[in-house]
Image (cartoon, rainbow, N blue to C red):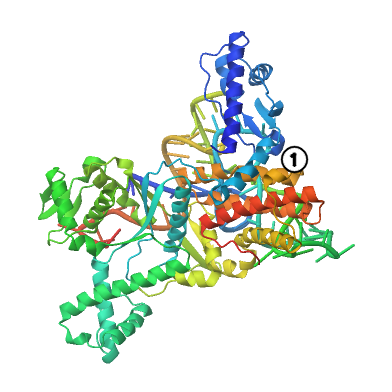
Amino acid sequence: MSIVLQQKEQLSSAIYRALEAARENGEMELNEIPEIGLEVPRDTSHGDFASNIALITAKAARKAPRDVAQIILSNLDQGNFIRKVEIAGPGFINFFLSNDWLYDTLRAIEAQGGKYGDSDYGKGEKVLWEFVSANPVGPMNVVNARAAAVGDTLARMFKAAGYDVKTEFYVNDAGNQADIFARSLEARYQQINDANYPFPEDGYPGDYVGEIAQILYKEQPDLLQMPKEERLEFCKKWGTDKMVDMQRADLKEYGVEFDLWFRERDLHSANDLERVIEFLEERGFLFEDEDALWFRSTEFGDDKDRVIIKSDGTYTYVTADIAYHHDKLKRGFTKLINIWGPDHHGYIARMKAAIQAMGYPEDTLEVMILQYVALLRNGKQVKMSKRAGEFITMQDLVEEVGKDAARFFFLNRSPESHLDFDLDLAVEQSSENPVFYVQYAHARISSIIRQGVEMGIQVPASKDVDLNLLQHESEIALLKQLSGLPEELLMGAINREPHRLTRYALDLASLFHSFYTHCHILGEEDSLRASRLVLVTCVQIVLKKVLTILGVEAPEQM
RNA sequence: GCGCCUGUAGCUCAGGGGAUAGAGCAUCGGACUUCUAAUCCGAGUGCCGCAGGUUCGAUUCCUGCCAGGCGCGCCA
């Protein structure tokens, strides 16, 4: 249990006992004692912890909130950890504790290192995070970049929260788009020898198709010997594999490495679609109408039934997706979390229906809908069209603003908010980007420790220093911030809020920079210097931990 | 028409049943003989989209409306 939680528990049981005592001695009538809420107030003048219990119970007790608070106080056993209690505002009870718990936080960080802040909340539940899953027919876009950053970070937050996590990229290499891509690639290949060879009307116009056609030509100069059908099949497989390789490389450069890459074509070759259709058929969820086979998804709350096999005998996209999710479940995952773009939100109901038809609870599948990213240049939105071959790719973005800045920028916003990404601003102010502010704090600490070592000063163990020397306002503020990591990490995972962590990192960096200005370290006398070295080392550990989860570098110097 | 998301400071965005609504950027003024000034300290700004409702208390929850983005295929 985190130290903050320990404090809250101590306080709430003290309040509970006070309420019971008040009830017994007749000072207060109260049938039920509600759950006692405690929070860390934003304003430090409101204490270390505050409770609104008096406001909540006032009505049932038929007393004014401040009177209730006064009764609680007069029955409260302050023990030896509560330094001061006061009633404030409409009836809040503010608790001021002795600093021992803050110093315990340093000991915990020292003992746990990079694991500080982790919990076993998830109890090892197997969770699969699927995100990006961009079609292997072109470069990834900025929404993919947003999804990559969010998914990658949330997956790590889940690991920290005690889940058994895998990340997966689903490759749509078997559908219409893959066929169109194959025809586009084949046409570009033909054009190497015959400039007038017709390009398909619906083909992908981007230059990249021609570029990889060149690579294909070098590797396979005799492709034209093949029968057309066979050649298109080859182009589809080779081409989508090539695109997947490129996507994998781009993602790696962006700091995202998936545990698993799942190919749609493997579902087809393993006859998984037939199998899942049979499975649903047996359970009576399918019916025929107008020469097509339908899935009765309305039985599970979808607003329409969905076609599974089209009248021409081919499958729809959702069929493969059902088979895919069936496969995920067969692999033993009990929680499937997908991150989709806003254009797919209409898909949620039918996939959840499928999950239920397969016999699993509706909330086994959770879909996070990420909102769009609008790119602005010269104050105007950049119009992008895959059709016209005009778009700013993830790769362009990373090259332009850098991996760390791009990731931080995406992660610093709540996933469901629409996002305006001003390219001019991102480039122009790249040296003032918040990410550097956080990294600079880490580099500064590294520098202090480095110089200490040069002077023959090592970072001491906390047991060998007097942590009580840490009394400065900026030191206390830092300690409080450090104590908050476990809760931030856990709440961030539970609520799927990566931006909690960027915010936490910014706040921690800010408090450190302020401390740095007000307090010196290496020049201080031995005992104070030792205590502060312990403190900044803990700040460094926590900064590095958070940056690692965010997928951002923690530089030793800048 | 139905569904999802958004509406908070000049801009980009946090927050969220409670105590004076926050940060960064931008603007203005200070701080480097001292561990990195990519830093710090200080200053101003808000019908929290509008209107009702629930509540001791609503910017937060509920309903309706307005505005913007995106969906609603035997496409993927």
Residue A406 coordinates in the image, percent (x, y): 52, 64
Q: Residue at x 59, y 31 (%)?
A: A8
Name the residue at 51% across, 55% down: A549
Quarter-of-image position of residue A553: bottom right
Image-based side of A53 in relation to A357, left or right: right
Q: Is residue A207 above or below residue A327?
A: below
The residue beneath circle 1 is A468
Between B46 and A546, the one lying in front of the other is: A546
User: Residue A521 at x, y = what percent?
Assistant: 77, 54
* Furthest residue in direction top, as rendered: A26
Q: Nearer the viewer, residue A416 or A457?
A: A457
What residue appears at the point 18 percent right and 53 percent down from the top-left corner? A307
Q: Under tag 1, what secondary structure?
A: helix
Residue A219 drawn at (x, y percent): 29, 84
Q: x%, y% of residue B15?
A: 56, 43
Relative side of A360 to A155, left or right: left
Specify whether residue A197 is in view: yes
What's under tag 1, amino acid-wise? Asn
Residue A495 visible: no
Which class describes the residues within 10 Å of circle 1: few (<14), some (14-19), or many (20+)? few
From the image, which quarter does the C terminus of chain A lie in? bottom right
Question: Measured along the vertical axis of the image, is residue A337 above or below residue A249?
Answer: above
